[in-house]
């Protein structure tokens, strides 16, 4: 599923769409457009313009043009395809099929190429001039001061706090489980209970996990991933994994090295 890591891959792929005159925009499902605009408005604003930059904040891809910013959210099954080339061929938990009828956005360029957002389950969205400030610190840029502010004085479970996009933008279910497993932290602990040493350890593993899994090609390439199933065992020490709901998401953690503090 697209987390900030996948959207970073999309951002890089979107570089091929820059500087090309926009000839047509198709949004065949009007409900896919959010933020109070409609497909006609988006076409009116952007046709004849060109994208000048591709940015990312958390899981939000931002395509800048002189007349406005096109924001793309990918939900669970959204993929970016530019000129027929998919930035990611297949997403975890998505269909193996690749059906053009799932195209929710098609930006056709004057040279005949196109940028497409293909989303099987229609959980993503397209928005003109989205509110970027509604998102917290970007996960690729977060520093120790940011993380301390995000965690301190919060009684929410650690995992739930890390998943809160208004606080820290870009982490999803798979990445959080992987990071906490690597950092030996219990996902159910109150976020504000981490001491300075634990926060530094968390930040170190967050950065290393993003770098490593980005090079591997996706959030689903974590060391924990193959054992995220009933009866799974910790790849580090062989202890059984627990499966719980934390922050509304299915959560796997080691019963030994991530056990709750006494």
Image: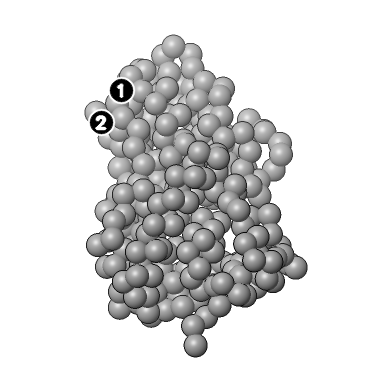
In the image, farthest residue toward the bottom: 262
Is 25 placed above or below 3 here? above
Left-right relation of 204 to 233: left
Compare residues 101 and 87 and report the one nearer the observer. Answer: 87
Could you say where residue 94 lies in the image, as x and y percent from the top left? 65, 46
Marks 2 and 1, Cα distance to the nearest angstrom? 7 Å
Q: Nearer the viewer, residue 40 or 133?
A: 133
Q: Residue at x 44, y 63 (%)?
A: 163
- Residue carrying label 2: 67
Task: Find numbered disc 1 in the image and state the secondary structure of the residue it sits on.
Answer: loop
Q: Quadrant of residue 198?
A: bottom left
Please name whichever residue, 229 or 199, is drawn nearer the observer in this view of the structure: 199
| Residue in the image at 38% along x and 30% along y | 43
In front of the other: 123 or 161: 161
**Count of picture labels:** 2
Mark sitting earlier along the chain (2/1) = 1
- Mark 2 is surrounded, within 10 Å at the Cα level, by few (under 14), some (14 to 19) or many (20 or more) other residues, namely some
Do labels 2 and 1 touch, CB within 8 Å?
A: yes
Q: Check disc 1 and report the residue beneath it.
A: 49
């Amino acid at each position: 599923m697209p987390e900030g890591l996948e959207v970073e891959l999309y951002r890089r792929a979107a570089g091929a769409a820059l500087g090309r005159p926009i000839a047509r925009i198709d949004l065949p499902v009007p409900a896919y457009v959010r933020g109070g605009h409609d497909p006609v408005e988006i076409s009116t604003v952007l046709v004849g313009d060109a994208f000048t930059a591709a940015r990312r904040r958390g899981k939000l891809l931002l395509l800048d043009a002189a007349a406005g910013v096109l924001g793309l959210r990918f939900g669970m099954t959204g993929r970016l395809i530019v000129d027929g080339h998919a930035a990611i061929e297949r997403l975890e938990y998505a269909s193996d099929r690749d059906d053009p009828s799932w195209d929710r956005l098609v930006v056709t360029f004057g040279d005949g190429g196109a940028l497409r957002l293909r989303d099987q389950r229609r959980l993503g969205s397209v928005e003109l001039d989205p509110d970027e400030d509604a998102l917290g610190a970007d996960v690729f840029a977060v520093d120790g001061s940011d993380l301390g502010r995000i965690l301190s004085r919060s009684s929410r479970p650690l995992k739930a706090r890390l998943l809160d996009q208004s606080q820290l933008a870009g982490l999803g279910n798979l990445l959080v489980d992987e990071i906490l497993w690597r950092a030996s932290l219990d996902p159910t602990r109150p976020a504000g209970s981490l001491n300075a040493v634990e926060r530094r350890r968390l930040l170190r593993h967050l950065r290393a996990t993003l770098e490593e899994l980005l090079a591997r090609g996706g959030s689903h390439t974590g060391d924990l991933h193959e054992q995220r199933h009933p009866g799974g065992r910790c790849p580090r020490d062989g202890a059984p994994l627990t499966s719980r709901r934390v922050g509304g998401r299915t959560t796997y953690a080691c019963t030994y090295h991530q056990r709750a503090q006494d």
